[in-house]
Image (cartoon, rainbow, N blue to C red):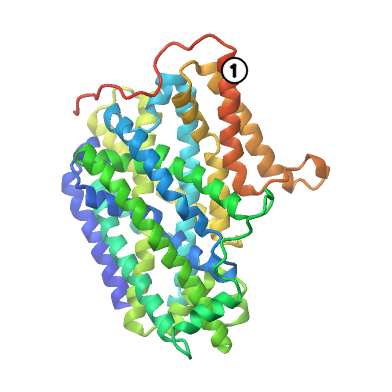
């Protein structure tokens, strides 16, 4: 408890120290565009290695196999595409919002549609992160899950509110180091605790096919290697290419080279680190197979609970405090609140209510919206208490809310003929596909032939393809749209 309380006090105090340097909206949103690439890269790594990775990934490999790791294997492709096309575009656009240019390209509706989709996605993500933290810490501390969720939500909101983007980036960097130390420590203790030595872990895991990447069959209704790979490609392109949380990080870097290096560092470091997280779950499976009397049946039945149980019952007190601090680190990522507040100001308040808001008024909007979105994220976490698998729930929600955004961006990138009508028709088609794939399997009275036969991970794939295909078709049948494509525009002066 001393380690936990000390870590939380240090992190919140460190984040709040930056309150002196967030006197303007630009300071709050992009830290004056002055941060070093290595710090931004650690922040990008921290965005990927949330409590979803820390707890849900070991839970998935414990319960099944390494099939979800296929998602991580698609990260390098998405990083290369983002570094080649998206980072230069956003760095030179002169805008903080990742979605401002959609109005220039397709109209105000496109900008607002993308913003709403992002806000829903971010609330689902932050809710999942806080929920997993509550599930992990409850058996270790004896605290109620709801109390842990609310407490963490308040702490994250506090240092994000006071310190802005600069506080979030630097605390993310600290979190990333603590997380890596925590997971490596756990893995070392697991391997050392095997009755016949570390080699027994690999023997038991291989015997039960725990290293499998899933079926390579052609089915699109099961969670095969190919289904997860398609999902990973589209989600990672969306993350690195159009997600405000990443775009805003690119803009905080001091120059273009630092922004590119930060993305390569954060993305490529995540690949081996995610393998470590999945191996933790595999090692847990072998550990409790070798010591079956140590794991209660009710814990073994739900993979997300096994790693927290191991931490609570197998680690000595001092080490337990360090690992719990690492789990807190995985959950305390304030960039979600910072980006939602940024979009609330730039794309909603200034766009529709007060375009000429004064700096003081803009800061007040940022403060109020940070608190409001923090409360909503905490509520979303409380609503997730009854879900079966946090990782699957998050992946499904991300596919539903993000399915149309990537298609809209790609349409603007690939076709200069596409205007507002083509984009609107494409988005409408994409929404219909997303709704059909999301809801039809749950309609009990719907005939089987009208239900979606596809796996839920393919929602973002088919939603994106529908937006792009229909938009390109309508554009081909219409007159060329006036205006420009997504080529970089001259940077605006920094105020």
From the viewer's side, name the closer residue of 100 and 116.
Answer: 100
Total label count?
1
Q: Position of residue 79 (x, y in %)?
A: 38, 44
Relative depth, front residue between 170 and 472: 472
Above or below: residue 288 compared with residue 57: below
**Mark 1 sits on what residue?**
474
Picture quadrant where residue 445 is located: top right
Question: Residue lying farthest top?
Answer: 479
Provide residue 444's location: percent of width, then percent of height: 80, 48
Judge left or right: residue 143 versus residue 204.
left
Instruction: Tell me the crowding category of disc 1: few under 14, some 14 to 19, or many 20 or more residues within 10 angstroms, Cα based.
Output: some
Image quadrant holding the C terminus, namely top left
Reply above or below: 141 against 271: below
**Residue 318, image x and y in percent?**
31, 82
Task: Report helix, strand or loop for mark 1.
Answer: helix
Residue found at x 38% / y 62%:
273
Please give the name of the residue rendered at 50% of the width and 45% of the height, measured from the top-left corner.
233
The residue nearer to you, when weighing 294 against 193, is 193
Look at the image and tell me whether residue 54 can be seen: no
Q: Residue lying at the far left in this picture: please name it.
A: 20
């Amino acid at each position: 408890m001393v380690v936990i309380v000390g870590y939380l006090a240090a992190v919140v105090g460190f984040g709040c120290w930056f309150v002196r340097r967030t006197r303007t909206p630009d300071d709050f949103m992009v830290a004056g565009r002055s941060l070093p690439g290595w710090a931004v890269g650690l922040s990008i790594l921290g965005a990927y290695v949330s409590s979803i990775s820390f707890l849900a990934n070991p839970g998935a490999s414990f319960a099944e196999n390494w099939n979800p790791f296929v998602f991580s294997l698609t990260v390098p492709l998405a990083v290369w595409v983002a570094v080649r096309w998206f980072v230069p575009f956003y760095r030179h656009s002169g805008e903080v919002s990742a979605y401002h240019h959609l109005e220039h390209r397709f109209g105000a509706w496109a900008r607002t549609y993308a913003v709403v989709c992002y806000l829903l996605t971010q609330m689902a993500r932050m809710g999942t992160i806080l929920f997993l933290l509550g599930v992990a810490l409850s058996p270790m501390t004896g605290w109620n899950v709801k109390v842990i969720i609310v407490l963490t939500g308040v702490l994250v909101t506090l240092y994000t509110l006071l310190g802005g983007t600069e506080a979030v980036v630097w605390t993310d960097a600290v979190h990333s180091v603590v997380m890596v130390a925590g997971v490596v420590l756990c893995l070392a203790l697991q391997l050392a605790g095997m009755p016949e030595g570390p080699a027994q872990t690999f023997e038991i895991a291989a015997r039960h096919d725990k290293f499998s990447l899933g079926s390579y069959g052609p089915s699109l209704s099961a969670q095969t290697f190919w289904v997860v790979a398609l999902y990973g490609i589209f989600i990672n392109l969306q993350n690195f290419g159009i997600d405000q949380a990443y775009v805003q990080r690119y803009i905080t870097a001091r120059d273009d080279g630092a922004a590119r290096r930060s993305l390569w560092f954060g993305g490529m470091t995540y690949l081996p680190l995610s393998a470590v997280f999945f191996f933790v779950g595999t090692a847990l499976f072998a550990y409790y197979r070798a010591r079956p009397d140590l794991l209660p049946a009710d814990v073994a039945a739900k993979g997300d609970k096994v790693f927290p149980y191991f931490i609570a019952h197998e680690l000595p007190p001092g080490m337990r405090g360090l690992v719990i601090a690492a789990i807190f680190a995985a959950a305390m990522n304030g960039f979600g609140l910072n980006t939602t507040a940024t979009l609330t100001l730039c794309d909603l308040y200034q766009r529709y209510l007060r375009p000429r808001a004064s700096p003081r008024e803009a800061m007040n909007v940022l403060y109020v919206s940070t608190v409001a979105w923090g409360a909503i994220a905490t509520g979303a976490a409380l609503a997730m208490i009854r879900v079966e698998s946090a990782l699957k729930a998050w992946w499904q929600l991300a596919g539903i809310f993000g399915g149309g955004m990537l298609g809209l961006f790609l349409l603007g990138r690939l076709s200069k003929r596409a205007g507002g009508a083509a984009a609107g028709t494409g988005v409408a088609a994409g929404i219909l596909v997303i709704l059909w794939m999301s809801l039809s399997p749950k309609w009990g009275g719907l005939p089987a032939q009208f239900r979606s036969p596809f796996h839920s991970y393919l929602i973002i794939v088919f939603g994106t393809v529908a937006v792009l295909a229909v938009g390109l078709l309508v554009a081909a049948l219409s007159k060329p749209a006036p205006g420009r494509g997504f080529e970089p525009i001259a940077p605006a002066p920094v105020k």
